[in-house]
Amino acid sequence: MIKVCKLAIPIEQRRMKAIGIIPARYGSSRFPGKPLAKIGEKSMIRRVYEKVRLSGIKDVWIATDDKRILTHAKEFGAQAIMTSVRHQSGTERCAEALKKIGGNFDVVVNIQGDEPFADPSHLKLLVNAFKNKDVQIATLTDAFDDLQQLFSPNTVKIIADHQLFATYFSRSVIPFLRDIPEKEWINHYPYLRHIGIYAFRTDVLQKVVKLKPSPPEKAESLEQLRWIYYGYKIKLIQVKYYGLSVDTPEDLEKANELLNNIYY
């Protein structure tokens, strides 16, 4: 009897098997209980979950550190799992959740629980980016069109190379434009804004959470600088972003206003 040997199809030539994990902690310093806050008639975490489900990612989980969020998630039919209260980032929470969930996934998409307007089509673009074998980590970026946001330390700016791999992230405006008034900078350079949704190859996620904090990360309080410091490449997917991250109660008011002005 002749045995037929099936050749493995390279990951770059087949559909990515992706899992979406939404880290959601209760104890935010600026907005405690944020995932349970209402935007319209639904909680913020529910809106994030439903957006991710629309992206075509079949396995979607909420990873939390609080039983109130866990109970609520299960009430509206989400898959949810408890994780440690000691995590310093959503990335660490995703890594623990993935370990507990198990399964054989190529890509892990980390969708923050404060992104109720995440665009499902953008998540598809992130997953598809891994058809390029050189992509280890991918994230979203958009061009700045507002001067006030450009100069805000709460918006993160990115310097990219010619292949749209990130070389640096900063809360400061980079690059500095010499001999041009600051109020005109946005008209003279295509400044890139970071949108904090990430995707990782599964093995890369497992490795980056074991890295020690780097000096640039400590200075800027941006964990992605740790990955660059240790040699990992972050692919930028440029999109047009119309959403809003909810970090404060004031942002929640803006989110409800935005909800009233779009079909959602």
Image: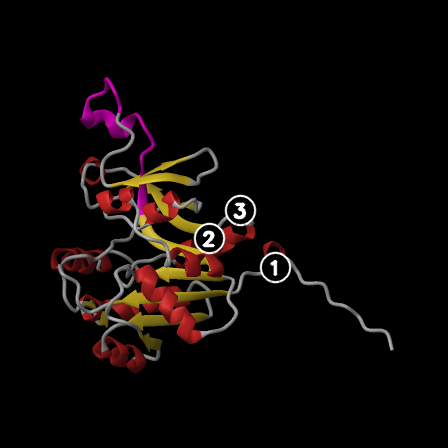
Give the residue at mark 2: 125
Q: Pinpoint residue 11: horizontal percent, then vertical percent.
A: 59, 58
Element type at mark 3: loop
Residue 174 vertical placement versus 72 (above, below): above
Q: Which mark is residue 131?
A: none
Q: Pinpoint residue 228: horizontal percent, then vertical percent.
A: 38, 44
Give the residue at mark 3: 134
Q: Earlier in the sequence, mark 2 or mark 3?
A: 2
Q: Amino acid at mark 1?
A: Arg
Q: Amino acid at mark 2?
A: Leu
Q: Pinpoint residue 214: horizontal percent, then vertical percent.
A: 30, 46
Dot 2: within a 10 Å radius of its alpha carbon, few (fewer than 14), some, or many (20 or more) residues? some
Q: Amino acid at mark 3?
A: Asp
Element type at mark 2: helix
Give the residue at mark 1: 14
Residue shown at the point (37%, 56%) measured from the top left: 119
Q: Earlier in the sequence, mark 1 or mark 2?
A: 1
In which image quadrant can residue 236 be found?
Answer: top left
Quarter of the image for the C terminus: give it: bottom left
Q: Nearer the viewer, mark 2 or mark 3?
A: 3
Q: Which residues are magenta?
A: 177-194
The residue sitting at the right extreme is: 1
